[in-house]
Image (cartoon, coloured by chain):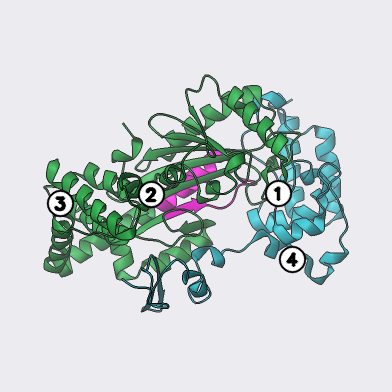
Chain colours: A cyan, B green
Amino acid sequence: MLCQNCSKKHATVHFVKIINGVKTEMHLCEKCAPMAQQEFPSIESFDIKVSDIINSFFGGSIGLLSGKCDTCNTTFNMFSQTGKLGCPDCYDAFWDKLQDPLRRIHGGVRHTGKIPKRTGGKTVGLEKLKEDLKNAIAREDFENAAIIRDEIRRLEGGK
Amino acid sequence: MKWYLDSGNEGDVVISSRIRLARNIKGFPFANLLTDEQSKKILALIKDAATGLNLRYLSMASMPEVNRRMLVERHIISPEMLRNTQRRAVLLSDDEQISVLLGEEDHIRIQCMTAGLDLWRALDLANKVDDVLEEKLDYGFDPRYGYKTCCPTNTGTGLRASCMLHLPALTASGYIETLLSSAAKLGMTVRGLYGEGSGAGGNMYQISNQITLGISESESVKRLEDLVKVVIEKERGMRDTLRRENDDKLVDMVSRSAGILKSACLLSSEEAYNLLSDVRLGINMGIIKDIPIEAVNELTITTGVAHIAELCSEDTPSSRDKKRAEIVKKRLIKH
């Protein structure tokens, strides 16, 4: 089959779009294929990107948010554009600003899964949890506060 | 034997199950910010930590391009691994069930694949690999937000569980659209066969979990498994309906597809893929009895563009189509 656009080269890229049962097909060569990307967006382009969530959360004020990770020099502004963090320490550097977007993405903001044995399998200390609880209540973040409260109870009960 | 030749539990609908764990090494930037020097150091560290796992170390850069694309077709590596090959490698088990991707978006991505619906065994395998690596590597981890990943969508467990499903009846009846939107409501994603950035071909869909923070590994796996079981029942129900209402048409379609595969002299990858999907349906519904499902499993992988290109002296679409038809014919008539 020849490319439907240039009619010169062999069509190797095939696009099929089905919207409300109406099927449209396009067969193009590799050179002409990029032009059809707009007409036939890939599944990926429907994905909600992390950067979209961050930006929608902070709205127009995002440019005003400062914050830089001292380990890798990634700024919060850079992160909001790419949706990718620079290094493990970025989580600590941006923690306060990450909480709400994380809750939007995951629903929860506290890890409840596997813990590496090398960290001694230990969870967060009680003191830190109590501080987190106080902060969550101050932020009126009652959903997260309830999770932290339950974890404190679990740890105290286990003593 | 390669794992993908097998048919596992619920193999009439579920082709395979996969667990992926994302991990990063403490004290290094994530892969996108690594210097060449750091990148080399990380690869060496992981290679050393993996001694004892009995995995082959394959550096992406030292492999011919066609072989790299073959790994994508066998779902061993992601298409992303084809870029920046100098910094990327994979650790692979002989049966190809375990692969550890190094230097992708995260430093380490442990992947375990099983045939059919077998997420728990895949999880068990992935955890074992993780435990061995963790003995020597210091992971970026925090008890509050779990395994630190480059993209916050993976932080927490870093676990992505997925199943590859063959859904010809739901696709043909149009119910697939409803299914896709309900899956999204349950925090699951549905994608085409080769993961990110590719459309669904041959009626194959990959369903995976999205949420990784505030949920344990086993809860993620359980939720996906529950959804997959519902989809299996829907697909089987729709196959029964097709059989009841349109039996002659269905038998005709799958038999013709088998006939074309056995006699065609030129087959494009797309055509082969769609015909193999029909034949798979025919075998699973008991209509086609003279082709073993293992042959379809094998050909679904080995008729991919890169697999065929590797066998051709001249890599052009027409020589590939000819070679593909030869391979299919030989395999279907041989057994």
Q: Do labels 4 and 2 share a chain?
A: no
- Badge 3 marks a residue whose secondary structure is loop
What is the chain identity of the residue bearing mark 3?
B
Per the model, the C-alpha gap separating discs 4 and 2 is 40 Å
Per the model, the C-alpha gap separating discs 4 and 1 is 19 Å
Which residue, given by chain and number where applicable, does mark 2 sit on? B306
Q: In this view, does B176 lie to the left or right of B287?
A: right
- Badge 2 marks a residue whose secondary structure is helix
Eye-nearest disc, 1 or 2: 2
What is the chain identity of the residue bearing mark 4?
A
x and y percentages locating residue B270 in the rendered image: 32, 61
Per the model, the C-alpha gap separating discs 4 and 3 is 53 Å
A156 shown above or below B235: above
| Lower position in the chain sequence, tag 2 or tag 3 | 3
- For label 3, count other residues whose C-alpha is less than 10 Å away and answer few (under 14), some (14-19) or many (20+): few
Q: What residue type is labelled 4?
A: Asn
Q: What residue type is labelled 2?
A: Ala
x and y percentages locating residue B238 in the rendered image: 27, 63
Which residue, given by chain and number where applicable, does mark 3 sit on? B286
Q: Is residue A19 left or right of residue B129?
A: left
- In the rendered image, the quadrant that contains the N terminus of chain B is top left
Per the model, the C-alpha gap separating discs 2 and 3 is 32 Å
